[in-house]
Each structure stands twice: as structure tokens, then as C-alpha cells.
Amino acid sequence: MKRYFLFLFIVLSTFPTILFANNQFYMCRAYANELAYAQHKSKAWRQQVFLQCMKNNSNTSTHIKNNTKVLKQKDINQRTFMDQSTGLMWQDEPYTMMEIGAFYKNNNQGKAGNWNYALSYCENLVYAGYSDWRLPDMDELKSIIDIRKDPSIKAGFKNATIKERYWASSPYLSEESEEWDLSFGNGRGFSQSKDASNFIRCVR
């Protein structure tokens, strides 16, 4: 009988801890899954976020909620550029070898492709926790040009390493089959066939 009551005491005394541990587990797992889905991250990256959430929040569920906000903001800051002079947030993500290959082979892949593809890519982009991205117009692209730098882009961009042409949403009125693009090699605008492949940098 004594053993029974001892067992019952241990179960009842640890039950709140078990409840909290489960709550923490599910909150962290849900956060990691949601963030990875929104930003197209791998299972390994999702697991890393989950473990960090569990490790840093062993006291209360409030800490979990606060820490996930910090994790999300840190990730956003690393993958975007916020231009304080215009209030625009820019996609700032490295270009993959497949995207670079698509640019030179005139294909559509990720952040490279023809003009219609570029419009669709930005309109459907879910990135850094946001879904209201769009292809920038010519004036917006010009606003991040800095011809004193190489490539010709404002300081603050962390992944601006390709000195090539990027699509603008602005129409090229002189020729219906062409659209404007802008080079981050020399900061100049050009007309380009809609069917050609350029790089893409979305804005919101």
C-alpha cells in the first residue's frame, strides 16, 4: 500500500511538469514547421530551430513565444534588406548555381527567368514571413543603386554579388515585346525582350 501511495505521489507531483514539457514540445515543433514551410527550409534546418526553441525555453511557455519571435526576426534580418530611406523591404537571398545557370541558358529557375515568370515569381513568393512581394518598378530599382560600389548597389545588401541585369515591372512603351531591366554592374537601365532571362529581386 505504501508503494502505491508513493507511486501516486510521484505521478501527481510530476504531472504539471509533463504537461508543460508536452506543451513546450508541441509549440516548438509547430513553430519550426510553420517557419520552414513559409521559407522553404529543409528538415535539418527545421530540426535546428526546434532544438533551439526547446533549449532556450525550459521555464515557461511565455519564453517560448518570445524566443520564437526573436528567432523569426533574426532570420528575417539575415535574408532581407530594409531601406530606411524609402521604407521598402528587399529580398536579399544568395543566388544558387542553378539560378545562375538558368540566367545564362535563358531558362526559368528560382530567382532567374523571363519577364512574365518574374512577375509571377514575386507575386507568389512567400519569403521571410511575408506574402505581399512584387516585382519592383524601375524607379524602385534605381533607388538601391550606388555606382560608387561594385556591384552598384547600396550598402546593407548582404548577398548582392552578381553584377548582371534585373527585371523591372515598368513597361517599355517603345516596343511591346520588350520590358525594362537594370544592371547592377553599371547602374544603367536597358530594354530587353520579355522572353530573355534576367535575375529577379522582389520587393514589398
Image (cartoon, grey):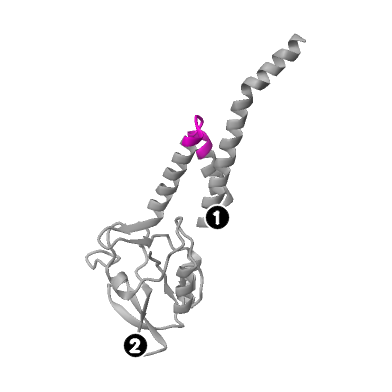
Upstream in sequence: badge 2 or badge 1: 1
Determine if residue 185 is in view: no
> Seen in the image, is 106 located left or right of residue 145?
right
Is residue 3 located in the magenta-colored stretch of the structure? Answer: no
x and y percentages locating residue 100 in the rendered image: 46, 69
For the magenta stretch, what is the residue range?
53-62
Q: Residues within 10 Å of mark 1 (few under 14, many from 20)?
A: some
Q: Residues within 10 Å of mark 2 (few under 14, many from 20)?
A: few
x and y percentages locating residue 99 in the rendered image: 48, 68
Residue drawn at 37 percent across, 66 percent down: 162
Residue 173 disc label: 2
Task: Name the dominant secondary structure of the magenta segment.
Answer: helix
Q: Quadrant of the C terminus?
A: bottom left
Residue 37 disc label: 1
> Which amino acid type is marked by label 2?
Leu
> Seen in the image, is 27 located left or right of residue 118?
right
Residue drawn at 25 percent across, 64 percent down: 149
Determine if residue 88 is in view: yes
Q: Quadrant of residue 136?
A: bottom left
- Secondary structure beneath dot 2 equals loop
Residue drawn at 54 percent across, 47 percent down: 32
153 relative to 16, above or below: below
x and y percentages locating residue 104 in the rendered image: 45, 75
> Which amino acid type is marked by label 1?
Tyr
